[in-house]
Amino acid sequence: MNSHREMNPMRCRPFGLLAAASAVLMFALGAPVLHAADPLTKCQRDTEKAEAKLDKAVAEHGKHSHEAAKDEENLRKQRETCYEHIHEWWDGKDQKWHHDDDYGTDLHNHGPDSD
């Protein structure tokens, strides 16, 4: 008779699967939290949504419409919110961040009439 116990690979398999499933679950649940915690990413994403909404309003109703004016104001507020929190604001048209030195002039020149 064999004096040592042989390890049965089938016996460890459920624990390995459980560990792998736990790792995938922790990554899947943790990734959105890390993503949402990044203020630059959140600012950029929210600003791009506001820019897209303004572009849609301009395309559907014209750049001097009530809808475009409302969405332009929302975009301005979004950029101001970013600036208040991170002292930068995102411009999707130029695909760049703007900082303190150009905040006062450039923020108000990126609406539907800025082309």
Image (cartoon, rainbow, N blue to C red):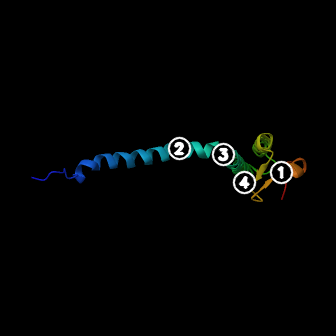
From the viewer's side, name the closer residue of 19 and 54. 19
Sequence-earlier tag: 1 or 2: 2
Q: How crowded is mark 4: few (under 14 residues within 10 Å), some or many (20 or more)?
A: few
* Front of the two marks 3 and 4: 3
Q: Is the Cβ of the residue at disc 4 closer than 8 Å to that at disc 1?
A: no
Q: Which of 51 and 67 is in front in this view?
A: 51
Observer-side mark, 4 or 2, equals 2
* Local SS, label 4: helix
- Name the spot of residue 109 as percent of width and height, x first: 86, 52
Which residue matches tag 1?
99
Q: Residue at x 69, y 44 (%)?
A: 39
Type of residue at label 3? Asp
Callout 4 touching callout 2 (CB < 8 Å): no
Residue closest to the eye, 35 or 68:
35
Q: Nearer the viewer, mark 1 or mark 2?
A: 2
Give the CA distance from mark 4 to mark 2. 38 Å
Taking the image as shown, residue 7 lies to the left or right of residue 92, namely: left
Q: Mark 3 and mark 4: span between their CA atoms?
A: 32 Å
For numbered disc 2, what is the local secondary structure? Answer: helix
Q: What separation in Å lies between label 1 and label 2 (alpha carbons)?
A: 31 Å
Quadrant placement of the C terminus: bottom right
Tell me, for residue 59, which label it has, or none.
Answer: 4
Q: Mark 3 points at which residue?
A: 38
Note whether 114 is above or below 22 in the view shown: below
